[in-house]
Amino acid sequence: MDSTTEEKIYEAARKIFVLKGMEGARMQEIADEVGMNKALLHYYFRSKEKLFEAVFKDIFTRFFSRIRGAFTSDLPLKEKLIVFIDNYIDLIAANPYVPQFIINEINRDPKVLKAMIFESGIGPQQLLEIFLNEVQINNQSNLDPRHIVVSLLGMLVFPFAGRPLLQLVYFNDDQKAYDQFLSERKEIVKNMMLKFIEV
């Protein structure tokens, strides 16, 4: 499969997955969107699940390629956090099915996600060391940097993964109001994290 065909398939699959979710999407719809025979699509990707995983890996790789430069640079932690938060929220806003896929993969086989993270070029230990250095600089020697990383991920992931319930309970199922709430997350999370680590 050439790169142009692959990108067309990924783009069509992303569009259908956003509209229908992974469960509601059909390979025939994706094949129709690309303009190819369903049998050929099955030749490239044996199942909808395999295609979904391939699309997710593509998104994941693009995301980490955007933040890799910042995290391996000499930028202050504040700037690294801003790059991470901005890119993460942009990624999820453009691909709203990603949080559910992450949760499903965590429960199904977390080794797959671990492999993707390590293949990204940004090791989890490297992230911990970045936060640990900042904690030590600010004399917060008793603060385990894993709390910082887990808190950051929780603040970023849960509002998207928990959207159906949160939108219903706190926003009277008003989609526009919840979209506005999510659009405010960048600045809210940045301010909270920067206060948390006192940079």
Image (cartoon, rainbow, N blue to C red):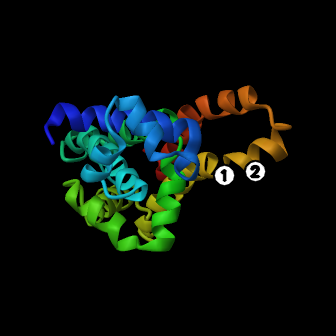
Residue 38, image x and y in percent? 36, 43
> Which residue does the numbered mark 2 point to in the structure image?
165
Q: Is residue 90 above or below residue 134?
A: above
Answer with the quarter of the image where residue 112 lies: bottom left
At 45% across and 65% down in the image, what residue appears?
105
Q: Does the rendering let one see residue 192?
A: no
At 35% across and 31% down in the image, what residue appears?
34
Residue 65, image x and y in percent? 23, 42
The residue closer to the viewer here, 127 or 108, is 108
Q: Does the rendering let one see residue 167?
A: yes
Please state the total of marks drawn on the protein image: 2
| In the image: residue 198, left or right of residue 137 | right
| Label 2 packing within 10 angstroms: few (<14), some (14-19), many (20+) | few
Q: Which mark is residue 149?
A: none
Q: Quadrant of the N terminus?
A: top left
| In the image: residue 109, left or right of residue 126 | right
| In the image: residue 62, left or right of residue 13 | left
